[in-house]
Image (cartoon, helix red, strand yellow):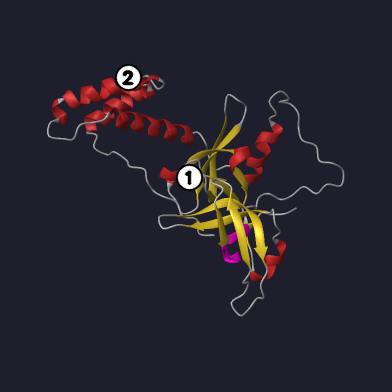
């Protein structure tokens, strides 16, 4: 599936060499303090009052803070020697229960353990609530609540679009496009992934099938119409099969 994603982050690159060297030193000496708002405001004021800033645009404190945040994120990712394989990711919330850290999952006798190495995943962006295909898992962490998060890179996008997402709520196996002959698989009430086309955007959102109008197929394939209701805003739309993906079944 072709997942589109806005590239709306602006990066400030107007720091002088001296300013960058100073921020690098401050980052090493006071890593936690460097993200504090008052600290960044004082540093921005000192930059704007310096001789090296004469004739150049003023530095905003938010730009200073963003620089430190980007450096801190890069420092964190550097500790991860390699991307996390999918099988490791899926085990994280299972083998580390909040109050049973030594407990290990036991497969029932006769159960087939699935091979997760070839699975493809999709993640829901916190920016727009849409789902995008995952290229790789870069890192993982546990919040104070005990919930696990992973740092993901989306297919077709660079590192500036990487995101931390909740493993339980925003990571799942990739939804499957449907062939024309498979329209009979969809039933009223089914959860689907629908390609929503708007004038200013085109993204994949979760939706539920509300109504199905079965029609005879022709040379073009499936002509059935599916009334779906988007989960994120409860709007409804009639769509063709080509815009729908189904959830994997086991």
Height in image: 147 above or below 230? above
Q: Is residue 115 shown to the viewer in this render?
A: yes
SS at mark 1 in the image: loop
Mark with earlier residue (2, 1): 2
Task: Report the span colored magenta.
Answer: 239-245
172 left or right, relative to 66? right
- Locate residue 87, reporting x and y percent: 66, 44
Residue 35 sits inside the magenta stretch: no
Label 2, residues with CA under 10 Å away: few <14, some 14-19, many ≥20 = few
| Residue under the point 50% across and 55% down | 3
Distance from disc 2 to disc 1, alpha carbons, whole Å, reads 30 Å
- Locate residue 11, reporting x and y percent: 32, 40
Residue 242 sits inside the magenta stretch: yes
Q: Is residue 82 shown to the viewer in this render?
A: no
- Locate residue 96, reporting x and y percent: 68, 30
Label 1, residues with CA under 10 Å away: few <14, some 14-19, many ≥20 = few
| Residue under the point 69% across and 53% down | 189
- Locate residue 107, reporting x and y percent: 81, 41
Check the image and name the residue furthest to the right: 109
Numbered circle sitting on residue 38: 2
SS at mark 2 in the image: helix
In the picture of the structure, the residue carrying the numbered disc 1 is 128
Circle nearer the viewer, 2 or 1 = 1
């Amino acid at each position: 599936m072709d997942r589109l994603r806005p590239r709306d982050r602006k990066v400030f690159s107007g720091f002088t060499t001296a300013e960058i060297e100073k921020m690098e030193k401050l980052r090493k000496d006071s890593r936690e303090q460097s993200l504090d708002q008052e600290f960044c405001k004082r540093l921005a004021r000192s930059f704007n009052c310096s001789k090296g800033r004469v004739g150049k645009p003023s530095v905003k404190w938010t730009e200073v803070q963003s620089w430190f945040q980007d450096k801190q994120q890069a420092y964190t990712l550097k500790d991860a020697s390699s991307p996390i394989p999918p099988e490791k990711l899926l085990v994280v919330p299972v083998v580390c229960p909040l109050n049973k850290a030594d407990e290990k999952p036991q497969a029932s006798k006769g159960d087939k353990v699935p091979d997760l190495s070839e699975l493809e995943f999709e993640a829901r962006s916190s920016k727009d609530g849409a789902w995008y295909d995952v290229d790789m898992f870069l890192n993982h962490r546990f919040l104070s609540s005990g919930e696990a998060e992973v740092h993901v890179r989306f297919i077709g996008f660079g590192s500036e679009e990487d995101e931390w997402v909740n493993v339980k709520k925003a990571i799942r196996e990739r939804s499957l496009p449907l062939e024309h002959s498979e329209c009979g698989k969809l039933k009223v009430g089914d959860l689907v992934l629908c390609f929503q086309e708007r004038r200013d955007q085109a993204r994949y959102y979760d939706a539920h099938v509300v109504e199905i109008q079965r029609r005879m197929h022709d040379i073009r394939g499936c002509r059935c119409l599916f009334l779906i209701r988007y989960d994120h805003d409860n709007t409804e739309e009639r769509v063709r099969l080509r815009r729908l993906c189904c959830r994997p079944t086991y």
